[in-house]
Amino acid sequence: MARLPRLIIPLQAHYVLLTGNDGVPLFKERADFERMFNFIYEQSVREDVLVHAYTLLSSQLHLMVTPKASDSLSKMMQGLGRSYVRYFNHRYDREGGLWGGRYKSSVVQPGEWLKKCLIYMDYLPQGFGAKSVASALQDDSKAPANIQSNTQVDPQGNVLANALGNFEWSSHLHYTGRRNDVFITAHADIWNLGNTPFAREERYELLVQGGISVEDCQHIERAIRGGWVLGDDTFIEHMQSLAHRRVAKAKAGRPRLHQAVA
């Protein structure tokens, strides 16, 4: 089956995932994380892309962004990828590529789905989603949302937070008021959480502490893997009207035949 062209809708939020080649560590020292921050800032400003959230894992880069133009995101990720590979190869005296193929992305509906994605990104350092995303990208038969032993799941099937504030390399600290990341632009859904910075930070913390369902984790991971739109049916239909390709996975089974009207 031919690979679908990447789906980019200007002025819509996109969840972006970039992975290392065969699990190659992308960050070996603190300086590597800091340099990646610099590249994200430089490339996002240059290509007019708003960065709303991020999580940097040992072999994965997760971003929530809004591109201003149809080619903004691709240019940003191309510049980011090339700049970091040059830096990394020079610093560690190595040659060759660093990335495990093209970046993956999913257009995300504002509102509940965007907030679920931000919570999901905050939880990734706990390990419940990071390995499952990587394996699912390689093999569709592998079930996503591989819940790890250090992750708590309540009786309702919600993954619960576990010392998220101890992880330094995500936007969780920014949105809970513990750090100011200059390259972060809060999405409207964050501004709508409260009228003051303190109110927004408190409300965001409560949202994250409330957890996210395993089913929602799986839904997010499938959307990223397939490059599908993440949202309700109405939003998906609207995105389809703006897109040049199919935006949602076809439902299983044969299409229903229309009966002639007598």
Image (tube, helix red, strand yellow):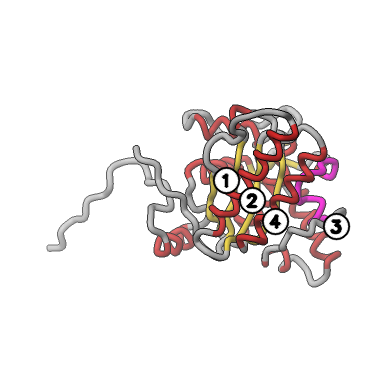
Q: Which residue is mark 3?
A: 177
Q: Which of the two discs, 3 and 1, sits closer to the camera?
A: 3
**Which residue does the image show at 69% across and 38% down from the upper left?**
155
The x, y position of residue 18, in whole percent, is: 60, 41
Q: Alpha carbon of mark 3 to alpha carbon of mark 2: how far?
A: 19 Å
Local packing at callout 1 (Cα closer than 10 Å; few below 14, some 14-19, many 20+) is many
Marks 1 and 3: in contact by CB < 8 Å? no
Q: Which residue is mark 4?
A: 42
The amino acid on which the numbered mark 1 sits, given as a three-letter code, is Ile
Confirm whether residue 145 shows in the render. Answer: no
Q: What is the span of residues highlighted in magenta in the rendered image?
A: 165-177
Q: Which residue is mark 1?
A: 220
Q: Which mark is residue 117?
A: 2
Classify mark 2: helix, strand or loop.
helix
- Looking at the image, residue 71 lies above or below residue 192: above
**Which residue does the image show at 65% across and 45% down from the upper left?**
83
- Looking at the image, residue 77 lies above or below residue 94: below
**Which residue does the image show at 74% across and 30% down from the upper left?**
92
Residue 168 drawn in magenta: yes
The x, y position of residue 207, in whole percent, is: 74, 54
Q: Alpha carbon of mark 4 to alpha carbon of mark 2: how far?
A: 24 Å
Task: Please state which of residues 34 and 172 is positioned toward the viewer in this rendering.
Answer: 34
Counting residues from the start of the chain, the first of labels 4 and 2 encountered is 4
Marks 4 and 1: in contact by CB < 8 Å? no
